[in-house]
Image (tube, grey):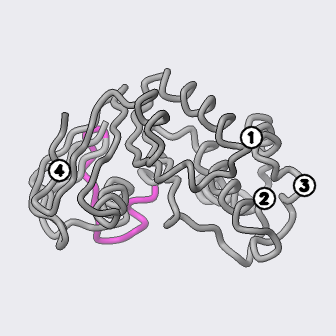
């Protein structure tokens, strides 16, 4: 699915990483900052100082963010670093990626998207601006936005903190259904039960680079 060859960023020494369909990696790190960094690298948010990022044999060009958009739409990035446009409604935020790629503003949320909005309790907030809703609803909206991409890769950061307690179990059920279709997942979590239930591989992160098991 993705391959990072001779990859180097300022905070981490050169490394190699390959992610295949069905891989579910749990991250263990010397520091939270390293875990954040690794997820951001996979999300194409940190350009390399050296090396190559390939997504399904396509070599990514970091020279212009627009070159990365076709690949970003295939990556579900559910983390505190993700955000919404504050001057737009929730509905518009959910549809922005489709507006761009389909080159039309006459698009509505489909049935699957509306179902997710209902599950995560934002159906009645779709026409509110981001500034008019609370933090947990914003995070729920980001979660829905990333899931409706039908992502080919999911990156997940501390779901037990990111998602409201009452929504955690429905989210885990959805996530398990997604990874049952061999969509790869890389995540970090303090929840040992969550990690042991879904992970089939492990990443150990140090400043000398990652090790994989």
Counting residues from the start of the chain, the first of labels 1 and 3 encountered is 1
Residue range corresponding to the magenta coloring: 56-69
Q: Position of residue 23 (x, y in %)?
A: 33, 30
Q: Which mark is residue 57?
A: none
| Nearest-to-viewer mark from 3 and 2 | 3
Q: Position of residue 188 (x, y in %)?
A: 40, 48
Q: Which mark is residue 91?
A: 2
Instruction: Please tell me in which quadrant of the rendered image residue 171 appears.
Output: top right
Q: Quadrant of the N terminus?
A: top left
Counting residues from the start of the chain, the first of labels 4 and 3 encountered is 3
Q: Label 1: which residue?
A: 116
| Nearest-to-viewer mark from 1 and 2 | 1
Counting residues from the start of the chain, the first of labels 1 and 4 encountered is 1
**Residue occupying the point 25% across, 43% down:** 203
Distance from Cα at disc 1 to Cα at disc 4: 35 Å
Distance from Cα at disc 4 to Cα at disc 3: 43 Å
Q: Label 3: which residue?
A: 124
Q: Are marks 1 and 4 in contact (CB under 8 Å)?
A: no
Classed neighbour count for the residue bearing mark 2: other residues with Cα under 10 Å, few (<14), some (14–19), many (≥20): many
| Nearest-to-viewer mark from 1 and 4 | 4
Q: Label 4: which residue?
A: 210
Counting residues from the start of the chain, the first of labels 4 and 2 encountered is 2
């Amino acid at each position: 699915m993705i391959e990072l060859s001779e990859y180097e960023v300022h905070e981490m020494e050169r490394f190699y990483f390959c992610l295949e369909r069905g891989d579910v990696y749990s991250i263990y790190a010397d520091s939270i900052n390293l875990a954040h960094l690794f997820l951001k690298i996979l999300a194409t948010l940190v350009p390399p100082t050296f090396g190559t990022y390939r997504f399904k044999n396509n070599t990514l060009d970091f020279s212009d963010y627009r070159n990365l958009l076709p690949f970003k739409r295939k990556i579900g990035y559910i983390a505190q670093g993700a955000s919404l446009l504050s001057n737009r409604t929730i509905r518009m935020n959910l549809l922005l990626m489709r507006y761009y790629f389909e080159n039309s503003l006459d698009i509505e949320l489909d049935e699957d998207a509306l179902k997710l909005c209902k599950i995560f309790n934002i159906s009645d907030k779709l026409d509110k601006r981001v500034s008019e809703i609370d933090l947990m609803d914003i995070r729920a909206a980001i979660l829905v936005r990333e899931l409706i991409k039908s992502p080919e890769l999911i990156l997940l950061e501390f779901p037990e903190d990111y998602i409201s307690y009452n929504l955690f179990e429905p989210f885990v059920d959805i996530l398990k259904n997604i990874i049952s279709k061999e969509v790869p997942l890389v995540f970090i979590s303090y929840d040992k039960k969550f990690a042991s239930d879904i992970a089939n591989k492990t990443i150990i992160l140090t400043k000398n680079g990652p090790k994989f098991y």
